[in-house]
């Protein structure tokens, strides 16, 4: 996707945003490791890390990371023929190239704490019970952050009436699925085309502290 963006004439700059400088209600500049950066339009799409900037913009969304975990059995001796949701254990087994992935778990543990041991051990136990005859070379462990607003609705739209900054974050468990549509909607909004859905439920300004929220 990034390559496509660059091929279309876009400029990709990867850097760390440490703060935003405000000019009244608007973003004057992003403070980054490569110095201040400004733009005609800023899109806030920092996934689980969006809260600090959103709150600085006055978008006081109640927001947490829902941490999720998976383990992967590398070079397994047997492979499931299809993905399976193991309802009793609340996890999903997926056959992948050269590995079996077992994923699940929701944990409220914030953005900074290291991965917890218990969810990974739980997945290991559940997989061993489900696939007792499968042998493998190694187990790879992973933890990631799902961006979760309290009402489970992503924030999609302008952050204020000026239309100089937009939000596109908070897709909780379905960001890979919802992201492309959200991208299309945001592109339409920035280029002043009317999207074909009612965006009111996703309006970032519903959290605007100036609206008394
Ligand atoms: C455990 C787990 C299970 C999931 N399961 C599903 C699923 O079943 N179906 C589905 O559709 N989706 C799933 N997802 C995706 C999830 O729903 C998220 O919504 C999605 O990953 C968020 O995408 P995003 O582009 O908004 O944020 P991200 O992909 O998190 O991207 C945010 C970006 O912001 C960057 N960033 C953060 N802070 C800064 C900073 N200070 N400066 C510069 N850059 C910064 C990060 O480096 C990152 O590149 C899952 C995610 C997890 C973690």
Image (cartoon, grey):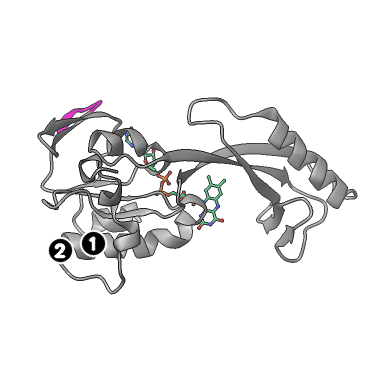
Counting labels gives 2
Magenta segment: 32-37
Image quadrant assignment for residue 60: top left
Q: Quadrant of the C terminus?
A: top left
Dot 2, crowdedness within 10 Å: few (<14), some or many (≥20)?
A: few
Residue 14 visible in image: no
Identify whether 167 is placed above or below 53: below
Residue drawn at (13%, 38%) of the image = 25
Could you say whether the residue bearing mark 2 is in a helix, strand or loop? loop
Q: Quadrant of the N terminus?
A: bottom left
Q: Position of residue 179 (x, y in %)?
A: 40, 58
Which label number is shown at residue 191?
A: 2
Residue drawn at (70%, 36%) of the image = 119
Q: Position of residue 172 (x, y in %)?
A: 48, 50
Magenta stretch: dominant secondary structure: strand
Task: Determine which residue is flagged by label 1.
Answer: 187
Toward the viewer: 106 or 73? 106
Residue drawn at (45%, 46%) of the image = 150
Which label number is shown at residue 114?
A: none
Toward the viewer: 101 or 163? 163
């Amino acid at each position: 996707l990034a390559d496509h963006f660059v091929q279309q004439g876009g400029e990709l700059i990867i850097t760390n945003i440490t703060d935003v400088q405000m000019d009244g209600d608007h973003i004057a500049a992003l403070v980054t490791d490569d110095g201040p950066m400004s733009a005609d339009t800023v899109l806030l799409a920092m996934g689980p890390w969006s809260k600090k900037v959103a709150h600085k913009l006055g978008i006081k969304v109640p927001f947490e990371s829902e941490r999720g975990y998976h383990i992967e059995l590398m070079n397994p001796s047997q492979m499931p023929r299809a993905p399976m949701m193991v309802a009793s254990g609340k996890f999903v087994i997926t056959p992948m190239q050269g590995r079996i992935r077992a994923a699940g778990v929701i944990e409220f543990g914030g953005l900074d704490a290291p991965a917890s041991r218990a969810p990974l051990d739980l997945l290991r136990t559940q997989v061993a019970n489900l696939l007792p005859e499968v042998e493998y070379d190694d187990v790879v462990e992973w933890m990631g952050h799902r961006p979760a607003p309290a009402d489970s609705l992503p924030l999609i739209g302008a952050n204020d009436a000026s239309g100089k900054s937009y939000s596109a974050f908070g897709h909780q468990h379905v960001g890979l699925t919802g992201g492309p549509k959200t991208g299309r909607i945001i592109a339409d909004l920035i280029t002043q085309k009317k999207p074909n859905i009612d965006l009111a439920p996703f309006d970032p300004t519903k959290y605007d502290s100036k609206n008394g929220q």
